[in-house]
Image (cartoon, rainbow, N blue to C red):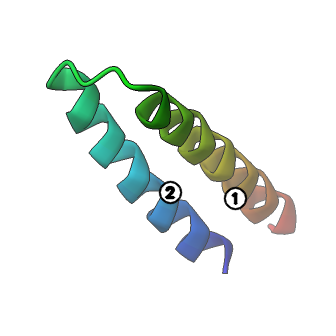
């Protein structure tokens, strides 16, 4: 389950980085970037904690 969340948030991260590289600096893009980084961090933490 954590790996699925990590992969979904990685997809959001790539999409938002692509938007930022196209100079689309809207608030929703920055919020999506922060959200995806947060979800990836939590998923990686719990995945490693389980091991």
For the residues labelled 2 and 1, the Cα–Cα distance comes to 9 Å
Q: Mark 1 highlights which residue?
A: 43
Residues marked 2 and 1 touching at CB (< 8 Å): yes
Callout 2 secondary element: helix
Q: Which mark is residue 9?
A: 2
The image quadrant that residue 46 belongs to is: bottom right
Dot in front, 2 or 1: 2
- Residue 34: horizontal and vertical position, in percent? 59, 34
Residue for point 55% across, 46% down: 36
Residue drawn at the location 75% of the way across and 51% of the way down? 42
- Tell me which corner region of the image, top left, top right, bottom left or bottom right, holds residue 31: top right
Q: Callout 1: few (<14), some (14-19), or many (20+) C-alpha neighbours within 10 Å?
A: many
**Quick one: quadrant of the C terminus?**
bottom right
Q: Position of residue 20 (x, y in %)?
A: 27, 25
Q: Position of residue 29 (x, y in %)?
A: 41, 35
Between residue 14 and residue 24, name the one nearer to us: 24
Q: Is residue 19 left or right of residue 4?
A: left
* Residue plotted at (33% across, 20% down): 25
In this view, 22 is above or below 50: above
| Relative vertical location of residue 2 with respect to residue 38 in this rendering, above or below | below
Q: Quadrant of the N terminus?
A: bottom right
Whichever of labels 2 and 1 marks the residue nearer the N terminus, that label is 2
Task: In this rendered view, identify the residue nearer to me: 46 or 31.
Answer: 31
Q: Is residue 31 above or below residue 24?
A: below
């Amino acid at each position: 389950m954590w790996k699925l969340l990590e992969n979904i948030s990685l997809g959001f991260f790539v999409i938002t980085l692509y938007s930022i590289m196209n100079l689309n600096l809207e608030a929703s893009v920055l919020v999506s970037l922060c959200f995806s980084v947060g979800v990836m961090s939590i998923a990686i933490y719990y995945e490693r904690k389980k091991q």
